[in-house]
Image: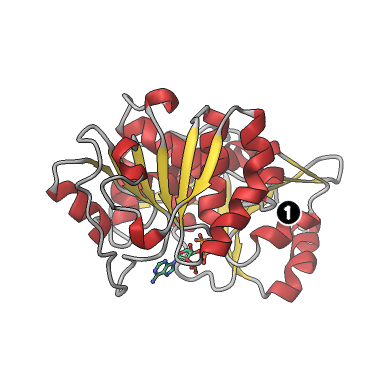
Amino acid sequence: MTSFIGSNQGGLSFPTLTGAAKLAGVIGCPIDHSKSPALHGYWLSKYQIDGAYIPMNVEPADLETALNGLRAAGFQGVNVTIPHKEAAALLCDHLSDRAKAVSAANTLVFQGDGLLYGDNTDGLGFIENIRQYAPQWQPDLGPVTILGAGGAARGIIDALIREGVKQVTIANRTEARARGLVDQLTQAAVASGSMLQTYRLDKIDEPEGPLSETALFINTTSVGMKGQSAFDLSFDALPKSALVTDIVYTPLETPFLAAARAQDLTCIDGLGMLLHQAVPGFNSWFCVKPEVDSGLRAHILAQ
Ligand code: ATR
């Protein structure tokens, strides 16, 4: 950690960067709603690091040029978000196993040897959030049911398989997409002794359906995000011991979680996934493994 000159006005800390400051940031299109600058900014301030984390709006056609420019400018690396995750993975010289498995990267590191390394920490963020708020959860507690088959579902299912979950049921509005996801992840699932299956979304809550044996029920769809209507879904078939989680965190209490909570089910909101997925990147770029603490959560909620 570097000590450097800073000022403190009205309780806020305004560090002054030195010429040796470490630089990172997030690339997306659009980027103005990203919470990552506030998140990394909190840690930079907490750990008094001589560094900066900058939001950057980059059009898809400019991604490679932007990455080359950031490397030339001495950046340590960047996060990439929608719509760049798949394209970023293709530009990497090497990928972590989990980024390879989902063909998408969200955390890039410009290595000293000139190579670009890509990781995908979304699945890890999901698992760490569950572990933080439901330490009793274990992969062998029972099957998982997941709503949605987009990029977020892909990363989470890959992480669940790696953790040792033995059965995952995927229900998606577009069934062909769910089947495609099963095809994509089956090899990894078989290697881990896991079984993937699809189920009709409109029948997911029927009493004899997969919910009756589910230990962890996850919403990865955008249904319930601010302004969107909620699922018409019954939680009656779920065991009372089941955990329910939603990766949407705006609002924090989604209609999906509110309905589950009304049935006295244990619920975990999606904010922690965002916080935990950021840890490996910060650690790589700024050489400190940051803590996901209540202060960080409050700081992000106050944005
Ligand atoms: P992400 O990468 O965040 O997962 P995505 O790839 O756009 O985003 O996926 C969004 C998910 O939300 C998909 O599973 C989508 O279902 P489709 O594959 O049928 O599009 C799901 N979704 C979005 N709006 C939905 C709605 N109104 N009802 C049901 N599912 C919905």
Coloring basis for residues: secondary structure
Q: Where residue 151 sits: x, y (%)? A: 56, 57
Residue 213 lies left or right of residue 241; in this view the side is: right
- Front position in the image: 25 or 61: 61
Position above or below: 2 against 263: above
Residue closest to the eye, 220 or 131 = 220
Q: Nearer the viewer, residue 149 or 302?
A: 149
Q: Secondary structure at mark 1?
A: helix
**Residue 65 at x, y = what percent?**
79, 68
State left or right for residue 204 relative to residue 161: left
The residue under the point 42% across, 49% down is: 146
Exactly how many numbered labels are in the figure?
1
What residue would you read off at disc 1?
A: 89
Image location of residue 6, percent across then percent down: 46, 47
Q: Residues within 10 Å of mark 1 (few under 14, many from 20)?
A: many
Is any atom of residue 193 visible in this view? yes
- In front here: 45 or 64? 64
Q: Quadrant of residue 241?
A: top left
- At a point 53% along the width and 69% down the height, the residue shown is 31
Of all residues, the one furthest to the front in this rendering is 208
State the residue at coordinates (84%, 45%).
115
- Name the amino acid, label 1: Ala
Q: Quadrant of the N terminus?
A: top right
| Left or right, residue 188 beside residue 210 | right
Image coordinates of residue 238 in percent, x first then y, are 25, 41
- Is residue 254 among the parts visible in the rendering? no
Q: Is mark 1 within 8 Å of ligand 1?
A: no
Which residue is at a point 44% across and 27% down the rendered structure image? 139
User: Where does the C terminus fall, quadrant-wise?
Assistant: bottom left
